[in-house]
Amino acid sequence: MALASGAGPLDEQMDGLLVHGENFQALNLLQARYQGQVNCIYIDPPYNTDASEILYKNGYKSSSWLSFLENRLAASKKFLVNNGIMCITIDDFEFHRCKSLLEGVFSRETLLGVVAIKNNPSGRSTGKGFSSAHEYALFIGNNEDVTIGRLAHSDQQLSRYKFDDEQGAYEWVNFRKHGGANANRQARPKLFYPIFVSEKDGVRFPQATWNNETNQWDLDEAPRSHETILYPLSPDGSEKTWKWGLETARAMPEEFCVKPDQTKQLGVYRKSRLNEQGTLPLTVWDKSEYSSTEHGTNLLCRLFGESEKFSFPKSVHATVDSLRVSKASENAHVMDFFGGSGTTAHAVIELNRADDGDRRFILAEMGDYFDDVTVHRVLKAAYSKAWKAGKPIDREGVSLLTKIIRLESYEDTLDSLEVTPPDSAQQDLLKGNPALAEDYRLRYALGVETSASTCLLGKNFADPFAYTLSVVRDGTRREVPVDLPETFNYLLGLRLESRRLMDGVLAVTGTDAEGKHCLILWRNLNETDNAAMETWFTHHRTKFTESLDIIYANGDHTLNSLKQSTETWTAQTIEPVFRELMFEETE
């Protein structure tokens, strides 16, 4: 893959990252690269019910589920920016335990709210006899100062704002407060003041002085002959208050008018502006678009032209609104490490399609359906907004550059182990000494008997482009290629700028997690020895050495001897750094 001239760093061109692998492993791999850079995490973990059962040990279902989730929540929290938000959807079975766990990983003070989403309008029978029609979405911030985002106005809400001026759309609302304790004069006496009104001149706010002895306003001027004095009195005569203070209202006379109220009497009205950012979300979401059947299951049927591609997909509209509330703004990074069918990526694509945004998604999913459903859905969602029977019915496509990586599984590691058992003399010794045999099994067997395994990175990377794992797929052992350069990029937390194959050497440039500018050189040691590497570097050095901090190269090398007096970079060998980063303990 080469960097196009003028296109900018490769990572900055990426719209999404899809990871096929176990999510805890994925979180550990991606941490160096994306720590502190994700704006919103949205996850839909297994609900721990009969419909979404996962495997457990010892029958301690809730405790095992909590342990399973806690590890991943703690690891993912490190990805959030300081004002980031996490959203978790869950149902009644584990709701309270999930809420307590979430407050433990973050804090109780940062819980932003809980929303009940009507995701199953037809209901689902339960053991208690009720028909369950909802799930919950828990929103929590990364600190106490985080606030939620707003949702788009509904058509009904927008229809109320029939007027507009140079400041935008507005509607006329009664200036008198209607309800609540603070709407009464006794609670806010300074908001009970006279206003002069007339059908001819409209509204005028008179000069008045506050009297601390009588606790009321004294008029400093009289109304004109055609003016009437209005106080904030309700139709039954109760003394209420105005919504603004006298000085504030007097400073903005253009915001007011006088017209008949519902009782046909003259009333004071002010302009209520349309909040361009949207409306505050309610704690109950019941729009028909949140149905997981119509806008989840049936949506997948329309996308793929067949049913049963994936069980219990979320409504893409519920996910879109969850991301809006989580402040997934136009350039946000969105993460979902329970990627499932790809609903979160689909939602990000729809948000970008709606406002021409530059949001990016990071999804991790380990299911066998990753290629047939998750990846395929993301591609289809980008190609067209609407589908029927697996065919696009519009051409509202968006550009999409997505990276797909696959992680070695635990089972792959076991498959790749090359076991060399003790020779006959050693076996006889162990048979004759049970204590020694037990000590050998516990302390030495795994390391000694598998030391020749290439999966343990025990060999130099003589040919990094031919590295493979020997794994079992569908009952057949096969060699699966491994991308060592890409793995090393993630271990360094590299923000990739370019990746170019130049005269037999793969040259990768970028900035690591510590902000160091890196040049990483990969070669086949049998084809490019140190003399050839020196020749290569001398020829190409001007392309890379400006602002360069560190050079990595596989195999022993002599690059440090080529450093000029004006240069500050140092060169290291890849293999020891690779092993240290691969097997270092994570906090």
Image: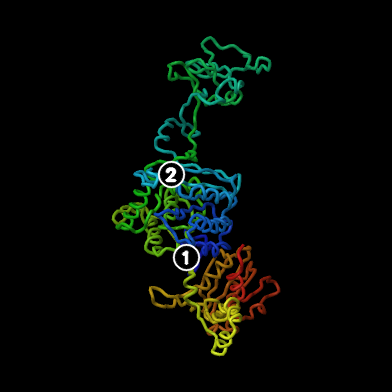
Q: Please tell me whether residue 16 is drawn above or below residue 277 in the rendered image.
A: below
* Helix, strand or loop for disc 2: strand
Any mark on residue 21, and which? 1
The residue that disc 2 covers is: 117
Q: Quadrant of residue 429?
A: bottom right
Dot placed on the residue nearer the N-terminal end, 1 or 2: 1
Give amino acid for label 1: Gly
Tell me, yes or no, if residue 507 can be seen here.
Answer: yes
Q: In the image, what residue type sits under mark 2? A: Ile
| Gap in angstroms between the C-alphas marked 1 and 2 | 30 Å
Write down the quadrant of residue 73 in the picture. bottom right
Q: Residue furthest bottom?
A: 425
Q: Where is residue 183, by image quadrant?
A: top right
Q: Nearer the viewer, residue 37 or 318?
A: 318
Where is residue 25? Give x, y as percent: 52, 64
Colour approach in the figure: rainbow
- Give x and y (percent) for residue 140: 54, 47
Secondary-structure class at tag 1: loop
Q: Relative to 56, is 32 on the left or the right?
A: right
Q: Is residue 535 visible?
A: no
Determine whether 235 is above or below 286 in the image: above
- Residue 580's tag is none
